[in-house]
Image (tube, grey):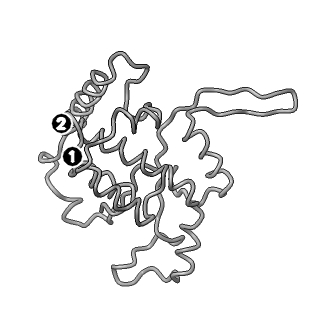
Amino acid sequence: MDEAPEFPRHVLDSLRQPLESGQVTVARSAGSVTFPARFILVLAANPCPCAQPQDQGESCHCSPTVRRRYLGRLSGPLLDRIDMKVTVARSSRRELLADRQFVESSRTVAQRVLLARERAAKRFAGTPWRTNAEIPSSSLHADYRPADAAMRPITSCLDSGTLSARGLDRVVRVAWTLADLAGKDRPDEDETSAALALWLGLTP
């Protein structure tokens, strides 16, 4: 969803339950029907309505209140369900004109993802799940919780109230995915810290 804050807030918030359950229920006067609805949600947003840069000649004239109100259309409960929040800087002229032969190809990235998914599928052999996103919360914390040392950054944020219970689940799942991408048997503190930074939106 490009320019996500431009969508009505009730439309955005209607995505919360399908994101959580992987199902969507359509209710009408004659009854209701539930459909499978597991999907990947990608939201893109400018920092303000005018979408002009704030650091290049001060093109943007939106006040802090306007910017806060604009991004406030993305509700806390919705953002709580977003696994990764990344700030993308405006591309410089040097980046746009850089030699593309040094950039990873889509085929290379796809192969790395395939290997990671194979590691996850092997780990879940004998279970109903095939990906980290499918593990129910009870099993996630009973059978797939990272070691105590790896959990330190997460528990610190839980103690301070920075991380919600829902966010905890999402951070642990992403940590497992990062471990799969790195070819590790279990996530360590590097993966949990990186996953936490992604959930908090601290990764540039």
In three-dimensional space, the C-alpha distance between marks 1 and 2, rounded to whole angstroms, equals 9 Å
Element on which disc 2 rests: loop
Task: Please indicate whether residue 78 sits to the left or right of residue 145 in the image.
Answer: right
Residue at image coords 12%, 47%: 102
Which residue is at a point 60% across and 45% down the rendered structure image?
Answer: 15
The 10 Å Cα crowd at callout 2, few under 14, some 14 to 19, many 20 or more, is some
Q: Is residue 26 left or right of residue 97?
A: right
Q: Position of residue 193 (x, y in %)?
A: 27, 55
In the rendered image, residue 99, in percent from the top left (x then y), is placed at 13, 52
Q: Quadrant of residue 65?
A: bottom right
Q: Amino acid at mark 2?
A: Lys
User: Considering only vertical position in the picture, is 200 above or below 30?
Assistant: below
- Choose between 45 and 68: the one closer to the eye: 68
Q: Which mark is residue 35?
A: none
What crowding class fits label 1: few (fewer than 14 Cα within 10 Å), some (14-19), or many (20 or more)?
some
In terms of secondary structure, where does tag 1 sit? loop
Question: Which label sits on residue 188?
Answer: 1
Instruction: Please give the label number shown on residue 184.
Output: 2
Residue at x-position 49% and y-position 83%: 61
The residue at 44%/31% (across/down) is 134
89 vs 158, nearest the viewer? 158
Give the residue type that dot 1 points to.
Answer: Asp
- The location of residue 121, given as percent across then percent down, is 31, 23
Residue at far top of view: 126
Of tags 1 and 2, which is closer to the observer?
Answer: 1
User: Where does the C terminus fall, quadrant-wise?
Assistant: bottom left
| CB atoms of marks 1 and 2 within 8 Å | yes
The foreground one among 29 and 179 is 179
The x and y percentages for residue 177 are 30, 39
